[in-house]
Image (tube, grey):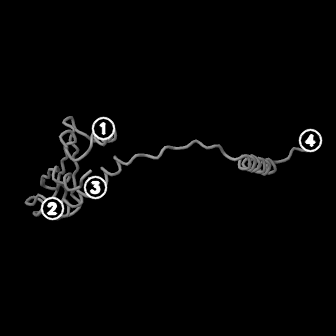
Amino acid sequence: MHKEKLLKELLFKGIRSSGSGGQHVNKVSSKIELTYNLENSNSISEKERALLYTRWSTRLTKENNLILHCDESRSQHRNKELAIKRFLTLLQNAIKVDKIRKATKPSRSSVLKRLENKKTKSLKKTHRKKQNWD
């Protein structure tokens, strides 16, 4: 994965941000929409692409585009930086291969300790009950 190549494939669009903000919000397009086409990308391998298709299945559009919005800041440049940062972390987390879990068995002493603890708690609760002396 080449970061420079990847950044060249991103498309940005400035949109008017929603919400309150007075006159300024109606004039300035500070919200950024980042679009990444996964199908036509040349910067990732086929293995990574297949992995991204499965991990991003709910995020992708019908045309296999990933769309991210950012309107956290009033500055369009800052929103663009934040969108790129968010995209890169999303990509790194999706490509990262999970470690295979090795099944382990609890040790005999830990099992005995747990059972002993259960017995003592059970006894403590039974002693709390009212005794019937009849």
Residue 110, compared with residue 22, is above or below; it is above
**Between 60 and 20, the one nearer to me in the picture:** 60
- Dot 3 corresponds to which residue? 86
**Between 94 and 16, the one nearer to me in the picture:** 94
Q: CA distance from mark 4 to mark 3?
A: 72 Å
Are dots 3 and 1 in contact, CB under 8 Å?
Answer: no
Q: Nearer the viewer, mark 1 or mark 4?
A: 1
- Dot 2 corresponds to which residue? 76
- Which of the two discs, 4 and 2, labels the residue nearer the N terminus? 2
Q: Amino acid at mark 4?
A: Asp
- Dot 4 corresponds to which residue? 134
Q: Nearer the viewer, mark 2 or mark 3?
A: 3
Are dots 4 and 3 in contact, CB under 8 Å?
Answer: no
Q: Position of residue 4 (x, y in %)?
A: 20, 56
Q: Which residue corresponds to the image point at 9% horizontal and 58% vertical from the top-left?
A: 26
Per the image, label 4 sits on a secondary structure element best described as loop
Q: Which residue corresponds to the image point at 58% horizontal and 41% vertical from the top-left?
A: 103
Q: Nearer the viewer, mark 4 or mark 2?
A: 2
- Mark 2 Cα-neighbour bin, 10 Å: few <14, some 14–19, many ≥20: some
- Lateral position of residue 110 relative to residue 126, left or right: left
- Which of the two discs, 3 and 1, labels the residue nearer the N terminus? 1
Are dots 2 and 1 in contact, CB under 8 Å?
Answer: no
Q: CA distance from mark 2 to mark 3?
A: 15 Å
Disc number for residue 50: 1
**Between 128 and 118, the one nearer to me in the picture:** 118
